[in-house]
Amino acid sequence: HTVTHGGSPPQSKSSLLPPAGTSATVFNESAFFVMQTLNIGGQSVLTFYDSGANTHLCDGAMAETAGFRVIDPTCTQISVVGGGQVYTAYGRYSSILGPDQDGLYHEIEAQGLESITSVYPTFGLKPINDEASSVMPAETVFPLTVGGDRVKLLLGIKNTLLMPKLTHRLPSGVCIFQCVFRDAYGSNIAYGGPHEAFTRGYAKCGMSAAHL
């Protein structure tokens, strides 16, 4: 028997497509997060700027070695996306980061964890730098690599002044961000989004590019 329902009849797949020339470009390359390698307490610290986090996280061992101040030694549980919880083997820390581009210092409080992420591949950034040089001032200092370690510091939106600012979106799909701090290369530039450099980096290490 044929069952009918109220409303408009089903549309064909072709009728659901947008008019020609009005759809956005789909980028098929792997994407990477907005990160910098900062020098904190003499250590190279892979730093993840995470606008989806409402607090800051730090690698507990890094915090101890770098001399972060313990403000609460109590281990606790933190909630993660999806409703799960993670037990922390460290307490809460305080540290002052800076100076930034304007000579200012920023105090942060971060929850210590045994591990924030797994180890990321080292991504060579020359292909992106070459593309970015067409839109950036000649005197711009570019980062040479990113990744190559676990994230040791995650900065969320608790300190919005620390969030990188989007300055350009390149034809390849990757975006250029201006950061408040200079990295280990003396650059205040970070990249985020899809690019073949990230695709190659993941493939070289045999790693999946899918991360949440």
Image (cartoon, helix red, strand yellow):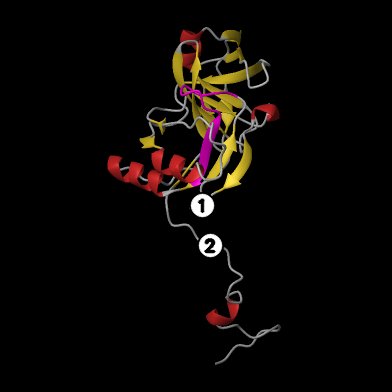
Where residue 137 sits in the image (x, y, percent)? 57, 37
Let me know if residue 81 appears in the view. Answer: no
Name which residue lies at 54% across and 33% down. 189
Against 67, residue 54 (above or below) is below
| Secondary structure mainly formed by the magenta segment | loop
Residue type for callout 1: Gly
Residue type for callout 2: Thr
Labels 2 and 1 touching (C-beta < 8 A)? yes
SS for tag 1?
Answer: loop
Quarter of the image that includes the N terminus? bottom right
Q: Can you tell which mark lies on residue 55? A: none
Which residue bears the numbered disc 2? 25
Q: Which residues are magenta?
A: 181-193
Dot 2: few (<14), some (14–19), or many (≥20) neighbours within 10 Å? Answer: few
Q: Name the residue nearer the viewer: 119 or 163.
A: 163
Name which residue lies at 39% across and 27% down. 149
SS for tag 2?
Answer: loop
Which residue bears the numbered disc 1? 173
